Amino acid sequence: MRRVITQDVVDKPFTMPVPEPEEASNKTLDRTEAQEGSDELDAAAKRDAGVAEEARQREAERVADEEARKREADQLAAEEERKREAARVAAEETRKREADRLAADEARKREADRVAAEEAHKREADRLAAEEVRKREADRVAAEEAHKREADRLVAEEVRKREADRTAAEEARKREADRVAVEEARKREADRIAVEEARKREADRVAVEEARKREADRIAAEEARKREADRLAAEEARRREAERLAAEDARRREAERLATEAARAREAERIAAEDARKREAERQAAADGRRRDAQRLSDEQARQAGSGPGAGGGGAGVAPGPRTSGQPGGGDLASRARDAVRGLDLLGRPSRALEERVGGPRRVTAGRVIRDIPLRMYVESWKAKIERNGNLNYSSLKRVRIDPVVVVAIRADGSVEEISFARSSGRPEVDEAVRRIVRLNARYSVFPPNIAANYDVIEIRRVWSFDDELRLIEEVD
C-alpha cells in the first residue's frame, strides 16, 4: 500500500518577491501601486483554486487508500485460503503415500506369490515343451522325408515336361534337323539323369545334416548345391522369360526400325528398280547389238561361202553348193558368234555356264558397312533369325575367351553354300555349335528381286559373341 503525506489547510500561500534594481523601483513605484490591487485579486483566485485542487487531491488519495486497504484485505484472505489448501493437499499427499506404501507391500507380496507359481508352472511347461519338441521333431523329420520324395518326383515330372515342350518347339522350328535334334535331346537327357543321380546322393547326405533347419532353408541349400541339371532347369525358366522379353523387345525394335526405314527402303527400291531397268535396257541393247553382229557375221560368212567356189572354178552362173566342214575361215567366225550368243540368257545377262567360265557367280561380302539398303535389310533379317533361334537352343554355351569371326555364304535360293571361320574360337565344340546353328535354321529367305538382280551369293561376315546371349556383331577396326 502506498503512503501519501498531505496538508489539510493552507493558511497562506508562499510567495517570493522578485528583487528589482533601486532605480527601476523608484521609477515604477506608481505603476506597481496601481497593479497591486489586481495582483491581490489574482492571488485570492489562485488560493481558491489551490484549495479546491487540494480537496480533490485529498479525496482521490482517500479513495486510493481505501482501494489499497481493500486489495490488501483480499490478498490476506487469498493467502489464508492458499495456506488452508496447501495444508489439505499435504494431508491428502500423506494419505496417498501411505496408501501407495500399503499397495506396494501388497503388490510385492502378490508378485512373490505369482513368481513362485510361475516358477512351478514354468518347470512343468518346460517339461511338457521338451516332450512336445521331441514329438514335433520326430513328426517333422518324417514329414521332410515324405516332402523330399514328393519334391523329387515333382522335379522329375517338371523336367520331363519342360524337355517335352522344348522338343516339341524344336520339332516345329527344325524339320530339316530331326536327327541332330533327337541325338542332342538324348545326350542332354542322359546328362540330366546322371546329374540328377549325383544331386540326389548329395541331397540325401545334406538332409541328415540339415534335419533341424526350416523347409525353406533346406530347399535353398539343396538348390545351391545342385549341379548342372538343376542349373539348366533354373536357366531354362530364366531363358524362356528372357527370350520372351528379348523377343518382345526385338519385335518392338524391329517394328520401329522397319517403320523408320520403310520409307527409305521404298525409295531405295524404287531407285534400285529404276537402275535395274536402266541396266536391263542397256544389257538388252548390248545383247541386241551382239546378236546383230553375230547375225551379220553369219550372213557375211554365208555369202563368202556361197561366192568362193564359183569364183575359184571360173564358171559363171553356177549355183552355190552347200557349205562343208572343209571350208576355210568362215565356219570359225560363225561358231564364235554362236558361242557369244549362247553365253547370254533371254534377258541379255551372262548365263550360269558363262559365269562359271569367267570366274563364278556374282558375290558380295556383307562386312562392316553396307550402303545397299535392300542388302542390309536382308542381312539384318538373317541376323535376327540366327540370334533368336540360337538363343533358344544354345543358351547353355559358356562364354568363350575368343569370339569367332564366321563367314556364312548364302545362295540366292536361301541355301547355305559354305560356313568358314576367319577366326576360330579355339574350342571345337563352340565352332561346331556355330555350324549347327547355321544348318538348323536353313533354308533362309530367297533373295528379293532387287538383290537377285545384282548378286548370286551373299557372304555375311560377323563376330559371334556368346556372352550372356548369342549376338552377331559387326567387326570394328
Image (cartoon, rainbow, N blue to C red):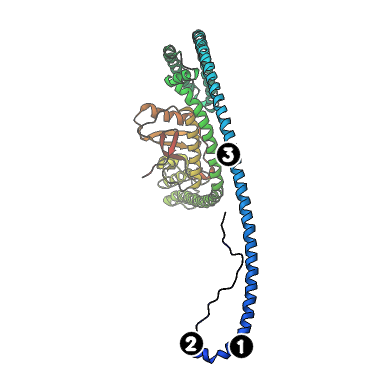
Displayed quadrant of residue 29: bottom right
Image vertical order of residue 432 relative to residue 473, above or below: above
Image vertical order of residue 175 relative to residue 12, above or below: above
Displayed quadrant of residue 473: top left
Residue with the mark numbered 3: 83
Q: Which of 246 and 72 is in front in this view?
A: 72
Q: How crowded is mark 2: few (under 14 residues within 10 Å), some or many (20 or more)?
A: few
Instruction: Give x and y (percent) for residue 172.
Output: 55, 26
Q: Residues within 10 Å of mark 1 (few under 14, many from 20)?
A: few
**Residue depicted at 65% across the width and 76% down the height:** 45
**Residue depicted at 59% across the width and 41% down the height:** 80
Residue with the mark numbered 2: 21
On-image quarter of the C terminus: top left
Q: In the drawing, does residue 206 fall left or right of residue 6?
A: left
Distance between mark 1 and mark 2 Cα atoms: 19 Å
Instruction: Give x and y (percent) for residue 373.
Output: 50, 47
Instruction: Give x and y (percent) for residue 32.
Output: 58, 87
| Mark 2 residue type | Pro
